[in-house]
Each structure stands twice: as structure tokens, then as C-alpha cells.
Image (spheres, rainbow, N blue to C red):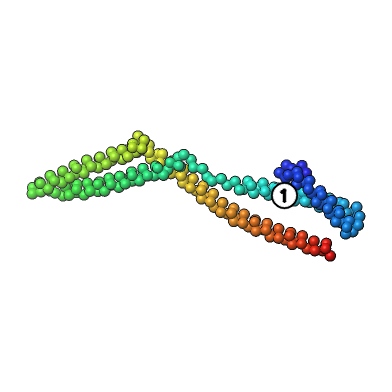
Amino acid sequence: MAQALVSGAAEEQIREIKPECISEEIKASINRRGKRPELFWLYLFEAVSKLKELIEKVRERVAEAKEERLEFPVRSPLAAKYQQLESIQRKLDDQNEAIFNRELELGRVRNELACATGIFKRKERKDLQEQVDSLKQQVASMKRWLSGIVREHGYETVQEFMQEYQAARKEYKAYRAAVEEWRRRTEAKGFMDMQLREAKKRTEEREEYRGYRSSGRGAR
């Protein structure tokens, strides 16, 4: 009895075993066979068996309850910030692409300037040099604006932002992986719960059928 109580069985459930397994069975036996005290140990054995069955059921419920506690993963503050940081990163990427395109244009004009030789291309060289100077200023201004983008969001430098962005991305990926694992385990558990419910239903139907047959024999 103590083991059953420690396992979590209600005392009322345990006390029901004696009248159910002994008193009722003895009465039924007397009605069928008359008084036969030698069968007492058989009924006692059945009571012990039922107590063990109760303990096992309680243990299964405790194990199931532990398994059911599949808590949804919690996002860290840095992982929660990732979406905001990702939008800033996209601005930086767009600016970098614009700088790259402007630098390509600068390289092309410089090549044209290098090829503009001879006394008759003096005016062309002047125009090309002006283009080179203008493009260099534009590129420098666009690079400065990279720092301006992150400063708008509270970061002193692009490097400072990138350090936090990389850390946030790592934590966010770990969080998403944990969510996927939680979803996989939850779906698997749902399938197992369905299988257990069906098995329990089949068992209950068999027990009901046995009870019906027993009552039928008693009536005859």
C-alpha cells in the first residue's frame, strides 16, 4: 500500500481493492461453490495483483505527464531582436550594392581617361577627369552613409552593429531549430496519443464484452 501511495495512487483507490477483489469474490465463490476457506489465498493474490496493476498505471500516468510538458521554446532577447536587425542589414546591403555599382562606373571612366591620349583629346581628358572626381566624391559620401545608417539605430560603427547582428542571427537560428524540434516532437506525441487512445478504447471494449459474458453466465 505504501508503494502505491508514494507512486501517487489515491488512498481511496487502494482501499477499494479489498472489497472489490476479496469480499465480492468471496461472496460470488460461496454462491457458486459453497464455503471454501482454502480459496482465500487465491483472492488475496488477486488483490495484490490488482494493487501492482494500479501502481503501474499510476507510474504510466506520471511518465505521460512528464512527456506532455513539451514547453514551447523561449526566444532570447537577442533572438527576438533579430528581425529588426535584419531590416537594418538589408539597408546596408542595398547601400553596399549601390556603392559597388558606382565604383564600377568609376573604374570604367578611369579606363577611358587612361586611353584618352594625344593632343587632340585634351578636352575629352578634362571632361573625363571631372567625371572621375565627381564619382570619387559620390563613392566617399555613400561609404560615409553606411555609418549613418547604423547610427540612426543607436550603433556607433558598422563593426559594432555587425557583431550584434551576427550574434542575433546565430541565436535566432538556434531558436528556429528548437521550434522545429518542438513541432516534430509535438506532432509525434499527438500520433502516439491517438494510438494510445485507440488501444485504450479497444481494451475497454474487450473488458465490457467480458463483463457482458460473465453476467450472462451468472444469469444461467
Query: At 80% across and 51% down in the image, what residue appears?
Result: 20
Apparent side of residue 137 relative to residue 117 in the rendered image (left or right)? right
Query: Element at badge 1?
Result: helix
- Residue 57, how many percent across, how many down? 71, 50
Of residues 33 and 62, the one drawn nearer to the viewer in this rendering: 33
Which residue in the rendered view is the most extreme toward the bottom? Answer: 220
- Residue 122, how many percent across, how many down? 10, 46
Query: At 40% across and 39% down in the image, what residue appears?
Result: 163
The residue that mark 1 highlights is 56
Any part of residue 211 in sight: yes
Q: Mark 1 is on which residue type?
A: Glu
- Residue 81, how many percent across, how many down? 43, 41
Apparent side of residue 58 relative to residue 190 in the rendered image (left or right)? right
- Residue 191, how many percent across, how many down? 59, 56
Query: Would you place residue 202 above or below residue 79 in this image?
Result: below
Of residues 74 and 113, the one drawn nearer to the viewer in this rendering: 74
Is the C terminus in the top left, top right, bottom left or bottom right quadrant?
Answer: bottom right
Query: At 78% across and 46% down in the image, what residue appears?
Result: 15
Apparent side of residue 10 relative to residue 27 in the rendered image (left or right)? left
Apparent side of residue 207 relative to residue 42 in the rendered image (left or right)? left
Query: At 38% across and 38% down in the image, what residue appears?
Result: 161
Which residue in the rendered view is the most extreme toward the front? Answer: 219
Q: Crowding at label 1, few (<14), some or many (≥20) Cα neighbours within 10 Å?
A: some
Any part of residue 45 in sight: no
Which residue in the rendered view is the most extreme toward the left? Answer: 120
